[in-house]
Image (cartoon, rainbow, N blue to C red):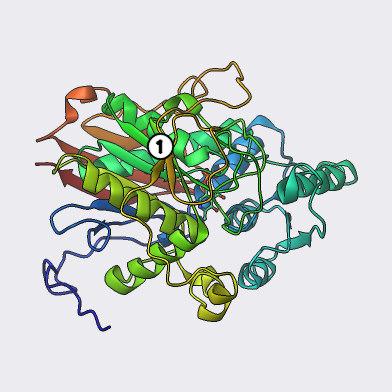
Amino acid sequence: MHLSLPAYLPEPVGTRTPRRRTARRPAHLVGDTPVLWVDEPFAPPGRGFHAKLEGANPGGIKDRPALHMVREARRRGELAPGAPIVESSSGTLGLGLALAGLTHGHPVTVVTDPGMEPAVARLLTARGTRVVQVTEPHPEGGWQEARRARVAELLARTPGAYCPDQYRNPDNVAAYRPLAAELIAQLGRVEVLVAAVGTGGHSAGVSAVLREAFPRLTLIGVDSVGSAIFGQPAGPRLMRGLGSSIHPDNVDYAAFTEVHWVAPAEAVWACRALARRHYVSGGWSVGAVALVAGWAARTHAAGTRIAAIFPDGPHRYLGTVYDDAWCHDHGLLGRTPPPDPDDITEPDAHPVTRWTRCDRVRDPLARERGTARDRGAAGVGVGVRVEAGSQAEVGDQVETEGRPGVGGQAQGGVRVEVEVRVKAGDQEEPGSRAKAGSR
Ligand SMILES: Cc1ncc(COP(=O)(O)O)c(C=O)c1O
């Protein structure tokens, strides 16, 4: 079937006023990612969602927390100049840490498992990162626990080594403040946020800041079947990025309105539908998020502004999600997802194996703690003008600091202006300046 591009291109390519986007260092390319409107086949024409394309970062969404965690660890003196960084990652944080290591001058070791795509392992190696692969899953905690154990081993025998521990580090959550400010600048208002959950970092960080401006925000979490995060039993998982066999501290359970579990065949269908219809696509989490965001666009009132975070692009999945032979061998082709998910009334009602939703979200470990907001994620009051900190050092992700003033009234008609400045060395460079009006 040949699908021609829909005739809704707003203007001929290249006629927009060029944005001034130059960088002195690769870390300055992080952030200020674009947003793309996605409708069919996920939702009928006129309905749809705004996809925040984090794959436009040099490494992916995790460039943001990698740079922030490393910078904060250096500031606190936990990471000495030139000391090694060791972390467990399925890939995306590894790519971000490669960038952070290069930026701040630290050797990086990434501990992973055989599921890491060869392309990612090669990219990491090319970028100077040492890749260590565990070969056996932990009997209870699976691959993730096996990786964590290996990290502990490496830390014990490497004096001065530092592990950011993305599952527990509040800086992983706080790193997403700029992403939320960008969304407000781009969309004006956000009523529904759809985000994948792995460590819990970006769902917690972005939603905490958005709720400052839009207290009635609906947060829809997207997890993988076989993931233990929201109370399902841990099982084998084909999908990488989202999901976990542990219960990461960074997941802000109280922030979620509902959670969806998505199966690999459904994510593959969505990834391929995205690529075919919208050119832009990504990996497992992108497919799962697109499927759920499309459903949200169909089931919420027309005009509801839905933002969906696409954590990365398609390239590292060319040998899996986009490979017919691989997908065929794993029984993932030719299965169009149903229009609606199954519903369960409790997150642990029974193990789910296909797209399923639950509007009760709770911490399976019933931990007592504050929300992401208490843990520092919502330090940004998003105001009419959001101005970046001028204290940034070379390689920082842009930090924002807002002025209160819009709050819950920001719904509709509000104009949001963002001015970002990055200080690189002695020279202060004006960064991006974005305006977004909402009707
Ligand atoms: C591709 C991809 N999608 C989604 C996620 C989940 O994001 P978070 O860890 O912020 O919950 C990750 C985490 O590593 C990822 O790599």
Residue 195 placed where, x, y %? 42, 44
What residue is disc 1 on?
206
Q: Which residue lies furthest to the bottom in this view?
A: 2
Report the number of discs: 1
Q: Callout 1 environment at 10 Å: few (<14), some (14 to 19), or many (20+)?
A: many
Is 89 or 5 nearer to us in this picture?
A: 5
Mark 1 C-beta to ligand 1 under 8 Å: no
Residue 407 image-quadrant placement? top left
- Asked if residue 247 shows in the view, the reply is yes
Q: What is the quadrant of the C terminus in the image?
A: top left
- Name the element at disc 1: helix
Residue 119 placed where, x, y %? 61, 72
Q: Residue at x 39, y 70 (%)?
A: 272
Is 391 or 122 nearer to us in this picture?
A: 122
Left or right: residue 419 versus residue 7 is right
Residue 247 image-quadrant placement? top right
Is 107 or 118 nearer to us in this picture?
A: 118
Q: Which residue is drawn at 76% across and 49% down?
A: 147
Q: Which residue lies furthest to the right in this view?
A: 157
